[in-house]
Image (cartoon, grey):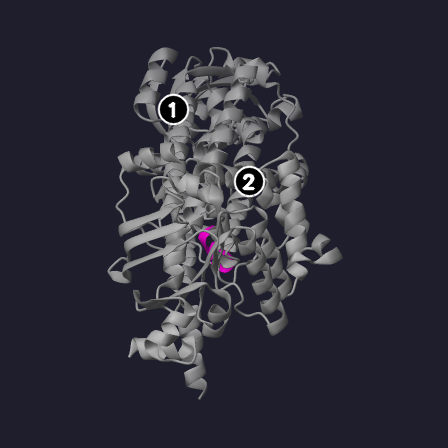
Amino acid sequence: MKAVEVKELVKDYGNFRAIKGISFEVNEGEIFGLIGPNGAGKTTALRTIATLLQITSGSITVFGYELPKEAAEVRKIISYLPEEAGAYKNLTGKDYLDFIAKFFGDGEKFQNMVQKGLEIANLGERINDKVDTYSKGMTRRLLVGRALMVNPRLAILDEPTTGLDVVNAQEVRRIINSAVEAGVAVLLSSHNMLEVELLCHRIALINDGVIIASGTAEELKNDYDARNIEEVFVKAIK
Amino acid sequence: MIGNIIKKEFKELFLLSTLLPIVVIAIVFGSVGNMIGNVQESMKAKPVIGIVNMNGGNLSDIAMSILSENAKVVYNGSDTESGLEEVRKEDGVALLAIPENFSQNIYANHPGEIEIYWIMKGAGMLDSISSSVGEGLIQSVNQGISTNLIQQNSSIDAALVLKPTKRIDTTFFKGKEIEGLSPSQLSNMLNSQSIVIPVVIMMLIIMAGSSVISSMGLEKENKTLETLLTLPVRRSQIVIGKMVGSALVGMIMAAIYMLGFSRYMGSFQSSNINLANFGLALGVQDYVLVGISLFVALLAGLSLCIVLGTFAKNYRSGQTLIFPITALAMISMFTIMFKDFDTIPAVLRVLLFVIPFSHPMMAMRALMLDNYSLVISGIAYTAVFTVVMIAIAVRIFNSDRLLTGSVRERVSLGKLAWGFRRS
């Protein structure tokens, strides 16, 4: 079964068409990257799949559940990490993980989720401090922990390493890879072409609401006779 | 250079969101000023009264002369019932009845009784002004008779000379005949019992409303709302959870505020009148109705705040959005404090009924006077208002507007109902 199937998706904001009929699929156990410049439609696509935005036309299914009809079922199996998201500042990191885990289970299941979140976040004693006191990297680790602790079948990660230093970005990428090894499908967006090349099994290049190329990093580089994905992108939009 | 900076500052600061609150405040103050201005006019006008004079003595003649000079007398006869009917018809203040032995009693060292049948129209602070003018008439009568007694060098007791008459008040108010109380006494008593409620409601709505709108602003600012909306929880549960959480915070904050305020109010109240003696005491069912009215008004306020909160882009803009709620609560509070629901102009009456916070503010006074229809219809209206607001909020939570600031689809009542069931 496909983790995500997007067919001819169109998304309008009033008179502005942000997505102009894109189609792609995400397989189980793979990392699929949507890459493109700011304003290309990456976040809109991710938000629509994450049940946050209405579909103007086209269709989206997540593990066979159709949106928006079965949005409630989709929310049970996905986890969404918005770009530059924060957590509730007056809660401690542990309280925040507890708060989220309670939506997904109770008893032992709840305890296991929180434990997993604590391990992924890896904040040590600071997990008992208020989120307000965390650095950007610590907050991001907490949020990645939150997103993956609930054992989602699909993790939707919007710019997961934006604003992080090299060490924190590498740590987040390691966590994502571990999740995929455990069977999670990941759909992520980034405008960091190098990161996507390193992380994703397959890539779609999106520009001005249209997917202009897709495939594995190697396929794309061969198709466009480019040394890296950045070069592929530049050639593709010309 | 400096002109450039001034221009930039002006553009940054002179926004619709900063201007609108000031405009609303100006309108509120203007309306209150207009109301007070009308009262001053009515104070200048001669009070409309009726007189039943059963005494032919010289002191009653003095009283009659003073009353005729200082008031517009619409009835001068001997039948109390006919007099009352005429005073009511002419929208008068009171019927004054001077009994047969009025002058004789004073000369016999007993106060001369004047029976006053007050026609009370409203229990607001400003409503009792017209009766205060009427009370001023009695003072004038006292002065006139005192002057006459002093000029006569009468042997009457000096204390009686200074205060030769005794008032026997009966007030007719909203179908009740209350013996022994003048309108100002009754108004003070009703207000001392019911004035705290409007202040509590106002504080509760502002505190709780501020919490819920700020929470929405913070959720958007920190992007926690996006996460919340992708969790396996119904939109209606998010809306109701936010309302109840904010209500609890608001109630705690309002309770702390009210601890101080009730001490402050207590220092002004020295009335030891027993309401039960006048048939004005509230029973258990009345307090239950006040509680229900308060509860549904709080829910109505919070549901309205949730809808407003969806417009908040961040914490700061959320703080601005609380203003319409504050203005509505203040309009209700001041109007109810100063005027009675029945004595305000029809347009203002409709406005007051439409504002859901008005109903618990009016409930206590209305129940004291057995006006159950106003309280029950207010509760029913507020409950419907709350359900509609929650449905709108849930609908917005299901739409793009929460994240993008626009609604793609037109919102109809049918769709609202469907959206509420679905969530």
Quadrant placement of the N terminus of chain B: bottom left
Same subunit: marks 2 and 1: no
B189 or A23, nearer to the observer: A23
Extent of the magenta region: B314-322
Whether residue B45 sits left or right of residue B282 in the image: it is left
A74 or B283, nearer to the observer: A74
* Residue A47 is covered by the magenta coloring: no
Q: Amino acid at mark 2?
A: Phe
Q: Amino acid at mark 1?
A: Ser
A163 or B4, nearer to the observer: A163
Estimate the x, y position of residue B187 in percent, counting from the top left. Answer: 51, 28
User: Where on the picture, by quarter, is residue B86?
Assistant: top left
Q: Give the chain letter at badge 2.
A: A
Does A21 appear above or below B162? Answer: below
The residue under label 1 is B377
Question: Residue A103: which disc?
Answer: 2
Does B396 appear above or below B352? Answer: below
Mark 2 crowd level (few <14, some 14–19, many ≥20, 10 Å Cα): some
Estimate the x, y position of residue B208 in percent, counting from the top left. Answer: 54, 43
Residue visible at 40% across and 24% down? B374
Query: What whole-number distance in Å separates the C-alpha atoms at marks 2 and 1?
Result: 39 Å
Residue visible at 49% across and 44% down? B231
Does B19 appear above or below B280? Answer: below
> What is the chief secondary structure element of the magenta stretch?
helix
Nearest-to-viewer mark from 2 and 1: 2
